[in-house]
Amino acid sequence: AIVGMDRQTRVMFWNPAAEKMFGWPRQEVLGKPYPAVPEGQREQFDNYFNRVMEGQTFDYLELNHQRKDGVLFYAVSTTGPLRNDKKEVIGLISYMFNITERKQAEQALQQSEQRYRSLVENTQDGYFVIDLPTGRFLFLNQRICQLLGYTRPEGLALTLWDVIASEDHALVRETVERWQKSQKVSSMANIYRAKRKDGTTFRAEISGAVVT
């Protein structure tokens, strides 16, 4: 959609794609203030509008808009000043694209990640993620920190080898090497001797899976 406005936010240009995106026919909006600012977002709109009137261009401006039927949607735009022959700013021109489906997918993914993280944090099992080549911890839940006696920042500075008793390093290394060679998603459960921060050990069943 292409939308043009003068310095008073009155619509100067409203192409057919804008009619389809916003729901207002061209004849209903020409010469009138831009109608698609959602309630409560006027200050944000005015802020960007005034910056464009000062000569600023936005190559990727993401804002919420409102259709004639009241439905809100996300649009990204390239928006810049419209100038006359004397190079004076007389308004703005905006090229808009509806990104509502993408935003909804992003929000759904974020909610899914939040639910998963909540599940992981509240489980009674220890859970961790490591970088396979180095064994460095990328994530540890609160339960594994409690079992090992480390704070999360301390744990993230360690590797898997720091929390496995040296007697079991060979067994762990064999498993890790097998995973690296296969380069496939696989899982295995083994009993290892885990080592706490205070040096004491305990037997733990560790189930692992390679994610590619």
Image: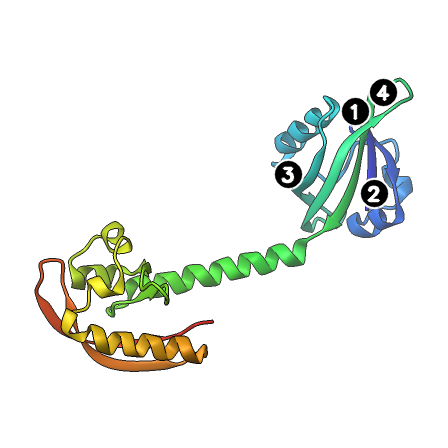
In percent of the image, x 72 and y 21: which residue is there?
54
In the rendered structure, the answer to whether residue 165 lies left or right of residue 136 reads left
In this view, 130 is above or below 91: below
Task: Of the two numbered discs 4 and 3 on the same chain, state the one appearing first in sequence.
Answer: 3
Residue under the point 31% across and 60% down: 137
- Residue 18, numbered label: none
Disc 4 element: loop
Up-down relation of residue 49 to residue 63 (above or below) = above
Looking at the rendered image, the disc whose residue lies closer to the viewer, 2 or 4, is 4
Which amino acid, mark 2? Ile
Q: Do the CB atoms of the residues marked 3 and 2 lie less than 8 Å apart?
A: no
Whether label 1 touches label 4, CB < 8 Å: no
For label 3, the SS is loop
**Closer mark to the observer between disc 1 and disc 4:** 4
Q: CA distance from mark 2 to mark 4?
A: 21 Å
Q: Mark 1 touching mark 2, by CB under 8 A?
A: no
Give left or right: position of 81 versus 30.
Answer: left
Marks 1 and 2, the one that precedes in the sequence: 2
Mark nearer the N terminus (2 vs 4): 2
User: Mark 3 and mark 2: span between their CA atoms?
Assistant: 22 Å
Q: Amino acid at mark 3?
A: Glu
List the residue tagged with mark 1.
8
Q: Left of 20 or right of it: where is 197?
A: left
- Residue topped by disc 2: 2
Which residue is drawn at the image coordinates 67% and 30% (left, top)? 48
Within-10-Å neighbours for mark 3: few <14, some 14–19, many 20+: few
Report the mark closest to the observer, 4 or 3. 4
Mark linked to residue 87: 4
